[in-house]
């Protein structure tokens, strides 16, 4: 794996305004969905992004691709800052970045045939038309394990797993370098999940793709990722390679997430230490002061309530934001 950064994120923030009033709307607060992220994604690797529902994972993915314009921060893709780009310049850049959406039932237009869905990016970016486009679409269907003669069918004729394959084919159509996989398997049956994960891994080695893989299932992330970032309430609290994270989690939130994953050995399960979190995730509209996790943290000390922990390297490219570590 080449260790060159394809995507660099610096100080990324995305706030959604909350407004009041029917005619004269005024901003009363912000939902701080993503609040100051710094990380890189290297060429050819898969970075897993995990955390509870509502912690800002999907917003992070969409903000990197500029589907949401960031409130602050920089997103460098191949050394160019996407945040400064507009219009045609950004549209040309979009060809290199694609997204696989979470819900295969909602992300495909029910009025378009499969051939039109997969072929649309080819027309948008002026890559292929006519017979060439049709051949390319059939090739893509074959690549993702579907019958190439399905081009004239509609999305409702397919199962969830097949629809997700169509979504993957669409994301591959423009030959991107970077794909954001936004929980691509969470809406599928467990037996189908493994097939889709294996397909994504095959495609990665075949086309030299780079993935940001968003999920809340830690066992899946362990299988597919090279490095894993753990997110809590708009911030990344820990980032390291997958083996270090599973063998030696440092942040109390990571420990809590891992202790929630069942181990299929009753003897080990009985002896291991459990980290049970109390309370709910605080609101991103009014996050706690200091460390955001201190309201639920079993090892919080006084400094955690007032001082935001710094993001630091604790050795071996293992980054963590915690006062206690």
Image (tube, helix red, strand yellow):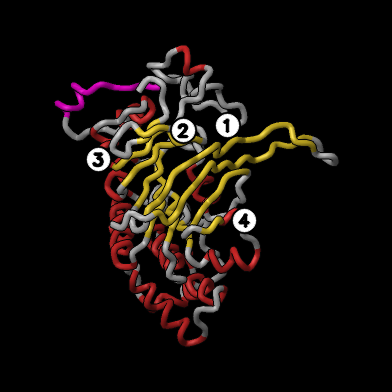
Tell me: residue 207, above or below residue 281.
below
Instruction: Please give the name of the residue rendered at 51% of the width and 44% of the height, measured from the top-left corner.
Output: 10
Q: CA distance from mark 3 to mark 1?
A: 30 Å
Q: Nearer the viewer, residue 254 or 308?
A: 308
Give the number of the disc on residue 47.
Answer: none
How far apart, in angstroms, are the residues tagged by discs 2 and 3? 20 Å
Q: Say few, some or many: other residues with alpha carbon within 10 Å of mark 4 (under 14 / 14 to 19 / 20 or more).
A: few
Q: Residue furthest top?
A: 302
| Rendering coords of residue 47 (x, y %) | 37, 48
> Does 43 appear above or below 275?
below
* Nearer to me, 125 or 112: 125
Q: Residue at the far bottom: name it.
A: 131
Numbered badge on residue 84 = 4
Q: Of the residues tagged 1 and 4, which is closer to the observer?
A: 4
Cβ atoms at labels 3 and 1 below 8 Å apart: no
Question: Which numbered circle lies on residue 232?
Answer: 2
Nearer the observer: mark 3 or 1; the answer is 3
> Upstream in the sequence, badge 4 or badge 2?
4
Q: Which mark is residue 243?
A: 3
* Residue 158 visible in the snapshot: no
Residue 101, position as x, y percentages in the image = 47, 55
Question: Magenta segment range?
Answer: 266-277
């Amino acid at each position: 794996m080449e260790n060159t950064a394809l995507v660099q994120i610096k100080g990324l923030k995305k706030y959604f305004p909350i407004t009041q009033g029917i005619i004269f709307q005024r901003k009363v607060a912000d939902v701080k969905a993503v609040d100051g992220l710094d990380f890189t994604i290297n060429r050819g690797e898969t970075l897993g992004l995990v955390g509870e529902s509502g912690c800002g994972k999907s917003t992070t993915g969409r903000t990197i691709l500029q589907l949401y314009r960031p409130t602050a921060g920089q997103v460098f893709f191949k050394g160019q800052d996407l945040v400064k780009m507009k219009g045609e310049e950004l549209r040309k850049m979009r060809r290199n970045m694609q997204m696989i959406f979470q819900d295969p039932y909602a992300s495909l237009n029910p009025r378009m045939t499969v051939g039109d869905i997969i072929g649309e990016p080819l027309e948008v970016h002026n890559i292929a038309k006519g017979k060439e486009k049709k051949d390319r679409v059939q090739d893509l269907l074959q690549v993702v394990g579907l019958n190439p003669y399905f081009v004239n069918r509609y999305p409702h004729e397919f199962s969830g797993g097949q629809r997700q394959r169509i979504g993957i084919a669409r994301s591959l159509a423009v030959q991107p370098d970077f794909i954001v996989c936004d929980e691509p398997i969470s809406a599928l049956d467990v037996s189908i999940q493994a097939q889709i994960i294996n397909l994504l891994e095959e495609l990665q080695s075949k086309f030299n793709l780079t993935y940001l893989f968003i999920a809340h299932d830690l066992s899946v992330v362990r299988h597919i990722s090279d490095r894993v970032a753990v997110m809590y309430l708009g911030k990344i609290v820990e980032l390291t390679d997958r083996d270090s994270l599973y063998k030696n989690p440092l942040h109390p939130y990571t420990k809590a997430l891992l202790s929630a994953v069942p181990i299929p050995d009753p003897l080990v399960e009985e002896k291991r230490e459990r980290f049970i979190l109390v309370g709910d995730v605080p609101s991103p509209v009014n996050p706690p002061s200091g460390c955001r996790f201190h309201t639920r943290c079993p090892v919080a000390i006084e400094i955690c309530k007032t001082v935001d922990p710094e993001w630091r390297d604790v050795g071996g490219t293992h980054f963590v934001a915690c006062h206690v570590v």
